[in-house]
Amino acid sequence: MWFRYILLLTLLASASLGSGWPSFRGENGSGVAASTGLPVDLGPSKNLVWQTPLPPGTSSPVLSGDKIFLTALDGKQLLTICVRLSDGKILWRQPIEQARMEARHNLNHAASATPVTDGKNVFAFFSDFGLVSYGPDGNRRWTHPLGPFHNLHGMGTSPILAGNALILVCDQDTGSFILAVHKDTGKMLWRAERPEIVHGFSTPTLFEAPSGEQQLIIPTSYMLVSYSVQNGKELWRVRGLTWQLKTTAVVSGGVVYATGWAPGADPGQANPVPAFEEVLAEIDTNKDGLLAPSEITPKYKHSGSWQAIDLDHDGFLNARDWSFFRARRSSSNVTMAVRPGNAKGDLTQTHVLWRNERFVPQVSSPLLYRDVLYTIKDGGILTSLNPATGATYKTARVPGALDNYYSSPVAADGKLYIASETGKVSVIRAQSDWEVLAVNDFDEAIYATPAIEGNRIYLRTARALYCFASVAQAPSEEKR
């Protein structure tokens, strides 16, 4: 009798740990888990199971069995860290030395890319080094050095797995490409050059066409693009996204949902400029076929830095630089839905279901949950949309969380969990007419996206990794 009881408890505990959050935002970037019994109140004294201090980093936690993987930076060491899921104990932390220190935005970080796991091994990307893989015990399996990169704000994408392929999107101002390496060896499977693409930060997701073809979906410069997982060949594109993409697309029911926001591209802000040849004839005073800063007249002035439009940083604007600047001045911030089916080529006029240019999120990715599409925009503006038509159900600010948002929302148990930059974690009742259940204040920065598994939610802040459950275990057993 006692043996059966203990065996039952062991099986239940194992089932609660699970392994359903292997990459950024969980399975295929959806941000959705099948968990139940999740807490509404979160904090150091609210439903805390354990708390583990961590070195600085903004990557999100991923889960595999009884392990959590994250990355961090300690001095000049780029760390991949393994934490025991059940009690928060650090099982191992493996360093790799920075090959260099990439330039990056002050909100970016050397450990911003979220790792991915195949259920046994872990794969991490550091822009200051490249790719590295570790086994379950922390043994280094292989490395694949990359860079230096040419991204104005530093790299921000995370790798994903598609079968045996580890795939990384490297969008930069010059030399953009997609790389696929074998997950067991680190050897290159294919590399797709993308010369027309400039800097971006989107993590790809996977789409299976009705034919069974596996596709890679990437929101990128001015368009949503699909590539073959097998060889990196472009399959289709939809034009009409903005110029700097940060969000991850969501795939569900044969439809791809994508958002894109960048400065100066809200409705009414478009300010088109002529083609390069016409501008040269007007303002290229020395007739060298290039535009120097001194030749740019007020009507063509860029509100940001010169480096943001001088893509190769040679001090002049050439035809490629100007074409990017021109597209930038005409682009639109938008949330859109596309049903590609088995189609190939340019699908802009044929396969877009809807477009909505209102309240587009800046960094935070969209969330599709229980037949409602949600977005969170800076200022705490939460919008629920009809995923079939793009019509708005409700838009309002989340009281007590009027903040910037770099973490993306996740959902389970009929609730949305949304973390703001200054540590306001809002719990929202998931419905078209959404309702705020609680706003929990952590009083420290949050850039990572939470992970959910079993009846627990895992949250990384600037200083620690937290585990919460509705009925937390006694501090003497698990609290750290």
Image (cartoon, helix red, strand yellow):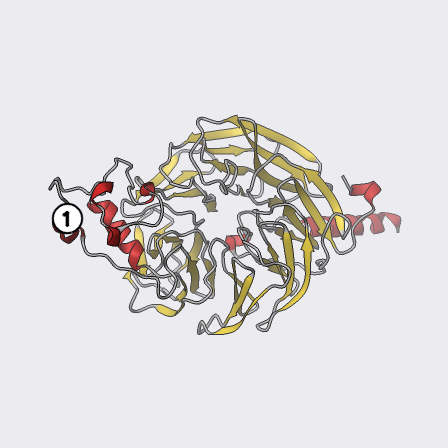
| Residue name at image x 70 percent, y 58 percent | 38
| Residue name at image x 25 percent, y 36 percent | 315
Q: Amino acid at mark 1?
A: Leu
Assign a secondary structure to mark 1: helix
**Residue 276 image position (x, y, % from top left):** 18, 50
In the displayed structure, 89 sits above or below 348; it is above
Which quarter of the rendered picture does the C terminus lie within?
top right
| Residue name at image x 23 percent, y 48 percent | 322
Residue located farthest toward the right when viewing the structure as drawn: 1
Say few, some or many: other residues with alpha carbon within 10 Å of mark 1 (under 14 / 14 to 19 / 20 or more). Answer: many
Q: How many marks?
A: 1
When asked about the image quadrant of residue 32, the answer is: bottom right
In the rendered structure, the answer to whether residue 194 lies left or right of residue 95 reads: left
146 and 100: which is toward the camera: 100
In the rendered structure, the answer to whether residue 253 lies left or right of residue 95 reads: left
In the displayed structure, 69 sits above or below 228; it is above
When asked about the image quadrant of residue 389, the answer is: bottom left
In the displayed structure, 28 sits above or below 128; it is below
**Residue 111 image position (x, y, % from top left):** 52, 37
When asked about the image quadrant of residue 51, the answer is: top right
In the rendered structure, the answer to whether residue 168 lies left or right of residue 235 reads: right
**Residue 50 image position (x, y, % from top left):** 74, 44
85 and 141: which is toward the camera: 85
Mark 1, residue position: 280
**Residue 428 image position (x, y, % from top left):** 64, 64
164 and 289: which is toward the camera: 289
